[in-house]
Amino acid sequence: MKKTSISNDFFEQVWETVKQIPEGRVTSYGAIARFLGAASSSRVVGYALNSLGNDKKHGVPAHRVVNRNGLITGKFHFKSVSMEELLAREGVLVKDNKIVDFENIFWDPESLVK
């Protein structure tokens, strides 16, 4: 995936990046924004993921994106199955709304260009 600046298809770039997050790993809104060449747009990354709604047919594992401290701040957007449950199914432990061992399971989108 090539780095780009914010454009009309920024949401689609976010979704395509999130689809690359391996099962059992997580990344942050900011890491995705930096990867896409828009370091100050982490909130826009969140908006892109929120725009998907609860339709799981899209194939974007939004539950794998957390804030820079490993907190699951997007959990209120998961209605039918909780973000915690989706992460637990992949072996990711969550305690007090925070990813356990965040540093070790963090996935850097920059690995796509190496």
Image (tube, rainbow, N blue to C red):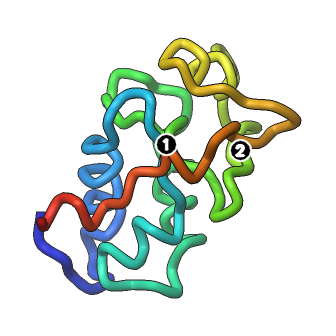
Residue at 20 percent of width and 81 percent of height = 4
Above or below: residue 44 compared with residue 61: below
Above or below: residue 11 compared with residue 6: above
User: Label 2's element?
Assistant: loop
Near mark 1 (Cα within 10 A), the count class, few <14, some 14-19 or many ≥20, is some
Return the residue at label 2: 72
Return the residue at label 1: 105
What kind of residue is marked 2? Ile
Residue at 81 percent of width and 31 percent of height = 95
Q: Residue 30 vs residue 21: left or right?
A: right
User: Label 1's element?
Assistant: helix
What kind of residue is marked 1? Ile
Q: Position of residue 9 (x, y in %)?
A: 25, 68
Which quadrant of the figure has residue 56? top left
Q: Earlier in the sequence, mark 1 or mark 2?
A: 2
Q: Position of residue 97 (x, y in %)?
A: 81, 38
Which quadrant of the figure has residue 110? bottom left
* Quadrant into which the N terminus falls: bottom left
Near mark 2 (Cα within 10 A), the count class, few <14, some 14-19 or many ≥20, is many
What is the C-alpha distance between the residues marked 1 and 2?
A: 14 Å
Q: Position of residue 59 (x, y in %)?
A: 31, 29
Residue 69's label in the rendered image is none
* Quadrant into which the C terminus falls: bottom left
Residue at 32 percent of width and 35 percent of height = 22
